[in-house]
Image (tube, rainbow, N blue to C red):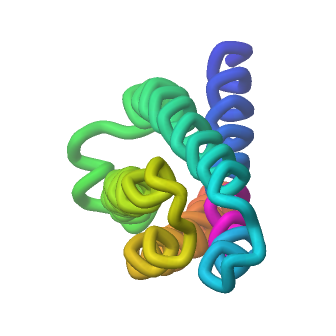
Amino acid sequence: MVLDTIMYTLHTAFASLWAGSVLFVVAAVHPLAMNGDISPENFGSIVSKLQWVTRLSVLVTFLTGGHLAGTLYSVESLTGSGSGHLVLTMLALWLALAAVVEIGSARAQRGIESGKIREPARDARPFYLAAAVLAAGLLVVAGLLGVASRYGLPF
């Protein structure tokens, strides 16, 4: 019981940190880079921090989510129930978010290293926009999963 609580708390904290970081970079920092209103060094530093938050969050949410799925679900309940489908949806969104953040950040870093800002920001834009949609989707699915487990709803 205590271990499950710790795992749930860590899972929620790191998932929230990750989603919030992605949304902040996409909404507040990336537009500045596209306009050239931030230095390449500062944008590069922020992109690098986003990559580290992503990598650490991927590791922690994978380990804690794996523990929670292993203790709360069977293969049958993951594939045969509404909440199980939400967990699998969350896993797919999690994988996609990790991929698009890494790809977008790599594209941004490639140009930043040569002192450019607008072109790397434009190259990263579609990936960062996709990351924002995926992060918001993860938060919605997490909310649905929480409601389903709290109130025993069928989805």
Judge from the rendering whether residue 7 lies leftward or rightward of residue 75; answer left or right: right
Q: Nearer the viewer, residue 138 or 96?
A: 96
Image quadrant occupied by the N terminus = top right
User: From this viewpoint, is residue 87 visible?
Assistant: no
User: Which residue is found at the position 66% from the left and 49% from the top?
Assistant: 41
Residue at figure coordinates x 51%, y 73% from the top left: 121
x, y percentage for residue 76?
Answer: 22, 47
Q: In which quarter of the image is residue 66?
A: top left
Residue situated furthest front in the rendering: 115
Residue 108 shown in magenta: no
Residue 138, position as x, y percentages in the image: 53, 65
Q: For the image shown, how many numbered marks are present on the structure?
A: 0
Residues 118 and 26: in front is 118
- The magenta stretch spans which residues? 20-26
| Lateral position of residue 51 relative to residue 104, left or right | right
Coordinates of residue 60 in the picture (x, y in percent): 54, 28
**6 sits to left or right of 22:** right
Tell me if residue 67 comes above or below residue 119 in the rendering: above
| 47, 61: nearer the viewer | 47
Q: Is residue 36 visible?
A: yes
Relative horizontal placement of residue 28, taking residue 94 as reference (left or right):
right
Residue found at x 40% / y 67%: 82
Q: Is the magenta stretch mostly helix, strand or loop?
A: helix
**In the depicted view, which residue is nearer to us: 140 or 33?**
33
Report x, y in % for residue 110: 38, 54
Q: What residue lies at 23% left-to-right and 41% top-to-bottom?
A: 75
Q: Is residue 77 above or below residue 25?
A: above
**Does residue 144 lie above or below 21 as drawn?**
below
